[in-house]
Amino acid sequence: MTGIAREAFARRFLMCPPSYFAVEYSINPWMDPHRPVDRALAEGQWEALRATLTGLGHRVDLVEPVPGLPDMVFAANGATVIGDRALIASFRHTQRAPEAAAYEKWFRDRGFAQVPGAAHMNEGQGDHLALAGLILAGTGFRTQPASLQETETYFGRPVVALELVDPRLYHLDTALAVLDDEQIMYWPGGFSAHSRHRLATLFPSAVQVQERDAQLLALNAVSDGRHVLLPVAATELAERLTGLGFEPVGVDMSEYAKAGGGPKCCALELLPGTPAPPG
Ligand code: ARG
């Protein structure tokens, strides 16, 4: 143990019930429409994730799922949200494009001052993680470099471009996780040499994760500063986090891994300052 007392901060998340979740097309190497999703198991895993978040004292809001949009359960991709500003995603694949309108409506109905849609391809919090006054942005597979200027201007925060290179780790939140406002964990092999250098300079004491764990989607983790929800199979990483004073909480998201997702993909984090829904 390091003796560091990690402090948990109450968070708000937006989740989308998995009513229509399925693997019906393939837009990343995990997805094989011939490998069926166990629907009952998927429901149970999603409910368990929600119960774990609320059990830790976090608030979980829900967006209504839309029939015909099987990936909408991955709420993290719907927008990038900081305070009262949400930038709605612009999806790379036509199969997911209509999700943007559903997320836009949710934010509009909650009284968000502005809910523009991104002008360039931009997959929301799947590729944008905020900490320490910065926004880390993943490019290479989904979010286009051309969108980063828009994100920087809209949120008024510097955006650090990080190029992803492993097709199985196609969103930033599959190769890197934010642990608290200053600390991250990542698998260096998921990034180009230039981006690895950038990360090493910005976060010299980051937790560097093994390839084996990264390939289990272990980096698709949700942290509240103390508890780190991560796929249950990532036992080695869980042990390391315990040694650093964090409390790992394993969640089984096996059905979502069939679509290339894990706990973080299913929970869009609404950062402090986000207006509360009415009622
Ligand atoms: N099947 C979805 C896709 O390929 C999975 C999205 C996972 N979300 C995430 N934040 N990594 O778009």
Image: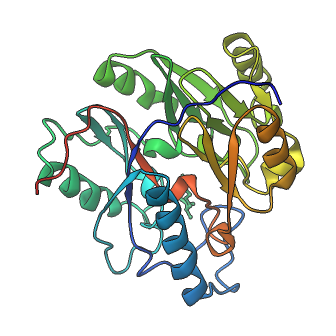
Q: Position of residue 218 (x, y in %)?
A: 73, 51
Residue at 46%, 55% in the rendered image: 267
Image point (43%, 43%), residue name: 124
The answer, for residue 185, to whether it is visible in the render is yes
Q: Where is residue 117? Give x, y as percent.
A: 27, 43
Q: Foreground residue, 167 or 243?
A: 243
Task: Locate the C terminus by quadrant.
Answer: bottom left
259, above or below 249, in the image? below
State left or right for residue 5 relative to residue 84.
Answer: right
- 195 or 214, which lies in front? 214
User: Quadrant of the rendered structure where residue 66 is?
Assistant: bottom left
Q: Is the N terminus in the top left, top right, bottom left or bottom right quadrant?
A: top right
- Residue drawn at x 33%, y 80% is 67
Classify residue 233 as left or right of residue 251.
right
For residue 271, what is the image quadrant? top left
212 or 224: which is nearer to us? Answer: 224
Instruction: Report x, y in % for residue 69.
Output: 40, 73
